[in-house]
Image (cartoon, helix red, strand yellow):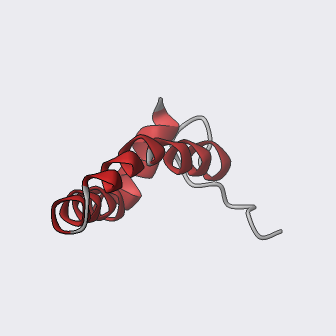
Amino acid sequence: MKRLLGLWRDTWWLWTGFFLMTIAFSAMVGIFFLLLLPCLPVPFLYFAFCRYDEDGNEKADLGD
């Protein structure tokens, strides 16, 4: 759980922007854009488990 909170702490603005853009596109272009909302947790979980340790801190050895 700390991994998810660590990623949210560092990138809340990005995920909020993705959510708001999806809502805006669905209102302007078409309702099928709402199908993207269930897809957003997939990359969120991927980055949380790959880039953050058990304590919610960003891993330091990513480029090595």
| Residue in view at x 38 percent, y 46 percent | 35
Q: At which x and y percent is residue 41?
A: 46, 42
Q: Is residue 10 above or below residue 53?
A: below
Q: Residue furthest right?
A: 64
Q: Residue furthest top?
A: 1
In the foreground, 47 or 27: 27
In the foreground, 9 or 21: 21
Q: Quadrant of residue 21?
A: bottom left
| Residue in view at x 29 percent, y 59 percent | 22
| Residue in view at x 73 percent, y 63 percent | 62
Instruction: Tally the numbered discs.
Output: 0
- Left/right placement of residue 27 relative to residue 56 reads left
| Residue in view at x 41 percent, y 40 percent | 38
Q: At which x and y percent is residue 15?
A: 35, 57
In the foreground, 54 or 12: 12
**In what quadrant of the picture does the C terminus appear?**
bottom right
Q: At which x and y percent is residue 31?
A: 25, 53
- Left/right placement of residue 26 relative to residue 4 reads left
Q: Is residue 1 above or below residue 44?
A: above
Q: Is residue 49 above or below residue 30?
A: above
- Left/right placement of residue 21 relative to residue 43 reads left
Q: At which x and y percent is residue 48?
A: 55, 46
